[in-house]
Image (tube, rainbow, N blue to C red):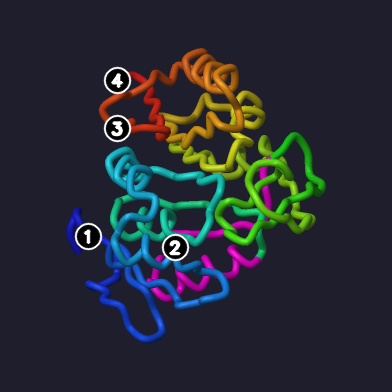
Amino acid sequence: MTAADPGAADDAPDTPETIACRDIRFPLDRGLLTPRLRTLLRSDGFEAKEADAALRLVKRGDVVMELGGGLGFLSTLLALKTRAKAVHSYEPNLALVRYAREVHALNRADKAQMHHGVLGDAPGEATFYLRDDPLTSSLFADHGPGEVLPLRTPVLSAEAEIARLSPTILICDIEGAEADLLPKLDLSGLRGVLVELHPRWIGAAGVAGIFARMHAAGLVFFPRLSQGKVAVFKRGW
């Protein structure tokens, strides 16, 4: 076990039952993995900018809170390829939660946990809009093309979850909900934040608001790890 590869996963070629991406095996669920997703996974191009930045941001002992857990790719990657203490991911789509847990188990990513729901002001429920491409689904009916299927998803208290986990790193990819959620979070215990921005949905004002909130919390934009819409903020650099 080395610093470069502290996890249990071996080099992982495709099999008839799985797809490999960065040595992580994904069950070949054709109902969930669209042709585009399968191509991105096989080429190691899936969430590449976010993954590269996260691997360099997360250090030994970090507790990672990931908002928008998706397929379980990033949580598995960080659990296996970094010295993070734990990775806690939150995902509103129950089908993705179940799939991500399969990914964690298949790759023996024991430090990764997937939680069903979104963070908010208080416990309750919210409407989640499912699209044909599950990774473009969101809390907004008008954020994307095509028909949507409204589903109910749990809302967990952001204050309670942060108090329970004491995260040191926050990763956020929530399809435009970042502009509303991030200003409400207690960022005081974080040493780093990685946000995938969605300016198409939140506009210049939303982007500016996120930067202002980060800087007010002592988290300064870190250009060395940022690229395109992936913005990284660090404390005390």
In the image, residue 88 sits, relative to residue 207, either above or below, namely below
Q: Is residue 103 magenta?
A: yes
Residue positioned most to the front:
146
Q: Which residues are magenta?
A: 95-119
Q: Which mark is residue 5?
A: 1
Label located before the other in sequence (1 or 3): 1
Is residue 211 found left or right of 52 in the rendered image? Answer: right
Label located before the other in sequence (3 or 4): 3
Task: Name the one closer to the observer, 110 or 93.
Answer: 93
- Report the mark closest to the observer, 1 or 3: 3
Tag 2: amino acid: Leu
Q: Dot 2: what SS?
A: helix
Tag 1: amino acid: Asp
Q: Which mark is residue 237?
A: 4
Label located before the other in sequence (1 or 2): 1
The residue at which mark 2 appears reads as: 37
- Report the mark closest to the observer, 3 or 2: 2
The residue at which mark 3 appears reads as: 225
Label located before the other in sequence (4 or 2): 2
Tag 4: amino acid: Trp
Instruction: Please provide percent x and percent y for residue 102.
Output: 50, 73
